[in-house]
Amino acid sequence: MGLQWCDLQVSARIKLPVLVKWMPPQVDFCLNVDGASKGNPRYCGGGGCIRDSHGNFICGFAFFYGFGSSILAEARALHDGLQLAIDRQLQISVVYSDFATILRAIDAGRVPHWSVFPWWRGILDMLQVLKPQLMHTFREGNQIQLITIMMPLSPPDQVADAFLQGTPSRTFLAELQEIVAEKLARLEVELD
């Protein structure tokens, strides 16, 4: 009533919710990758996992990349995931990433930022070999987040590069959540 008295028009846009769901590949395997930077630039890292058409976890990786930006972390995670697939001779039919900048740069055939140049040719070469479909997914649809968020928060002397094989248990995921929460709390204290 008060706004009408002042003769003000109010308009609001309603944003409809988007259903976010991980979709398994119809054939072969899919690669989910993600990178993260605690600050931009700051400590960064990335990781990913390869799943089969039933959603089963085949293998995964997580690396600490040192000091860098989110675009560097995303590009290196994509590079490392593609390299893992080639090393394990796994045919990847779909690559999921929540970083649209990298996906647009691949489509345009342009390096997204000078800092990723050392890995760019490798990414393009491996994409030519594997010929996967590149798909953007929302962060919530990229379930590898728990693994990748842990790596950027600790220097390599505190957290070793991790390779996982087999299905992560609920106990493993619960322990990983505790580690991530502890590292986030420790990092907040360090930044203050």
Image (cartoon, rainbow, N blue to C red):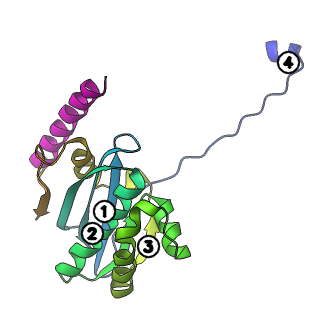
Q: Main secondary structure of the magenta part?
A: helix
**Residue with the mark numbered 4:** 4
**Mark 3 residue element:** strand
Q: Amino acid at mark 2?
A: Gly
Q: CA distance from mark 4 to mark 1?
A: 53 Å
61, above or below 18, in the image: below
Q: Which residue does the numbered mark 2 point to in the structure image?
A: 81
Disc 3 marks a residue whose amino acid type is Leu
Q: Residues under labels 2 and 3: Cα distance?
A: 13 Å
Q: Is residue 129 visible?
A: yes
Residue displayed at 38% across by 57% down: 72
Badge nearest the viewer, 4 or 1: 1
Front-most of residues 60 and 1: 60
Mark sitting earlier along the chain (4/1): 4
Magenta residue span = 171-192
Whether residues under marks 2 and 1 lie with C-beta atoms below 8 angstroms apart, the answer is yes
Q: What residue would you read off at disc 3?
A: 134
Q: Identify the mark at residue 77; answer none if there is no mark.
A: 1
View extreme (right): residue: 7
Cα separation, mark 3 vs mark 1, equals: 14 Å
